[in-house]
Amino acid sequence: MSDTEHPIRPTGPGTPEGPALPAVAPGALPPPSSIDRGHVRDGAVEFENWKGEADKPAPPPPAPMPPGERVGFAIMGLGRLTLEEILPAFAACKAAKAVALISGSPEKARAVAAQYGIAPEGVYGYDEVHRLAENPEVQAVYVVTPNGMHRDNVLAVAKAGKHVLCEKPMANTSAEAREMVEACRAAGVRLMIAYRCQYEPFNREVVRLVRSGDLGRPRVLEATNTQVQGPADQWRLKAPLAGGGALPDIGLYCLNGVRAVLGEEPVEVFARIVNPAGDARYADIDETTVFMLRFPSGAIANCATSYGAHESKDLRVRLEKGWIDLENAFAYRGQRLRVAQRKDENEAVEELRIGAKNQFALEIDHFARCILEGREPRTPGEEGLQDHVLMEALYRSAREGGPVAIPPVEGPKGRLDAFRGPEPG
């Protein structure tokens, strides 16, 4: 080995070749700074931003309400959506908690109650909804049953004096939806429809971008929601339970999505339905529906939904000065948002990376806060009713083969969002 060569040795604190940590006398450690310790404001802990200017600030820590102050929910229906998404979402809720279950399967209800720490006396059958009136811990019910059951379920919950969060589509028909709105109003309880995408951060950013005017007027919107449906023996393929096929189940996201982005209501609709020949699953419901909506501003929405095409759940908006592309807009997760516009002499395409949040928890918490604060939810029953009015016009258009005119709708004082409540916080 030459004079200039040395064997490689580990270095670092405490090694012969590395710097030694300074000796610190017991009790002489430096005290935590305000940036590490944080402070309490209005009952919540806040921290100063610890990151450098080049990185986006860290979000504030969760600030859930004390369990005893949260709104207690009973969940009605223990199918896949409840067990895979809704009940797990309560772990991320800040203003709501699951305190009861309503099911037609006692064995399943007992198993789920044990998993989520729900007391045995908090388990009810469908024929026991009236007993909810005796349980003050239950303030609201989340109805997650097949569509054809929603009307009877909501009417029973309203009669028991509990607020109602109802899954979409609201019912099977506009007549049922109207009855549900009136029943809740007469009972003095709030009714919200679970349009989760209107609370999801990426979708809300699309709404903000479009309505800001920074990209000019929206001219063409494209919304697609497709998936491949499986065996016939499931409630979605049975007209009495589903009320229809792809349109009310997944096409509704396209319909409600473009309405929410623009804030306008269409004045004309046109639709075509294509069902595969010889497939008994689609004897009474639609497999593939494409439809167009024309809005008062001149914007046109082209939408497509299908039970026979590989999964795609995207939303695109073409505006005067750019375009917006939201991939997986209607999915539970996996959203990706890109925005294009001119930058000097070039076309710039920017991806906005927004912190993902559990959209079920967001909608549940929104309804809980509306109950606590006595205000109207962003997506009340009237919003669901309007979608049924439009879907019935779309089915009529498909039957008759031509466009169907929709009477113009104007909100209070001419504002947008005629059927929606205030923006969520």
Image: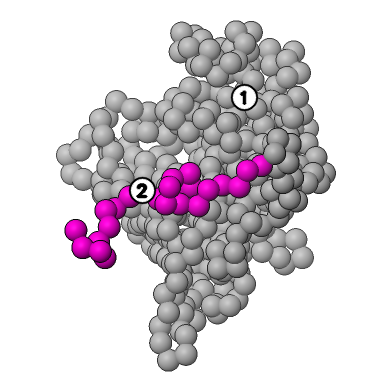
Taking the image as shown, residue 251 lies to the left or right of residue 97, namely left
x and y percentages locating residue 59 in the rendered image: 62, 52
Q: Nearer the viewer, residue 181 or 94?
A: 94
User: As displayed, is residue 382 above or below residue 114?
Assistant: below
Name the residue located 70 percent from the left edge and 42 percent from the top edge: 29
Residue 21 lies in magenta, yes or no?
A: yes
Instruction: Specify the quadrant of the image occupied by residue 49.
Output: bottom right
Is disc 2 surrounded by few (<14), some (14 to 19) or many (20+) residues within 10 Å?
Answer: few
Which type of secondary structure does the marked residue at label 2 adopt? loop
| Marks 1 and 2, the one that precedes in the sequence | 2
Instruction: Name the residue carrying label 2.
Output: 10
Which type of secondary structure does the marked residue at label 1 adopt? strand
Name the residue located 60 percent from the left edge and 15 percent from the top edge: 118
Instruction: Specify the quadrant of the image occupied by residue 4.
Output: bottom left
Q: Tag on residue 20?
A: none
Residue type highlighted by circle 2: Pro
Name the residue located 52 percent from the left edge and 57 percent from the top edge: 354
Instruction: Specify the quadrant of the image occupied by residue 102.
Output: top right
Name the residue located 46 percent from the left edge and 80 percent from the top edge: 341
Taking the image as shown, residue 395 lies to the left or right of residue 5, namely right
x and y percentages locating residue 18 in the rendered image: 45, 52
Is disc 1 surrounded by few (<14), some (14 to 19) or many (20+) residues within 10 Å?
Answer: many
Instruction: Name the residue carrying label 1.
Output: 98
Q: Please identify the dominant SS of the magenta region.
A: loop
Query: In this picture, which residue range is highlighted in magenta?
Result: 1-24
User: As displayed, is residue 106 above or below residue 100?
Assistant: above
User: As displayed, is residue 293 above or below residue 70?
Assistant: below
Q: Nearer the viewer, residue 315 or 242?
A: 315
x and y percentages locating residue 239 in the rendered image: 38, 33
Taking the image as shown, residue 263 lies to the left or right of residue 148, namely right
Tag 1 and tag 2, C-beta contact below 8 Å:
no
x and y percentages locating residue 316 in the rendered image: 42, 65
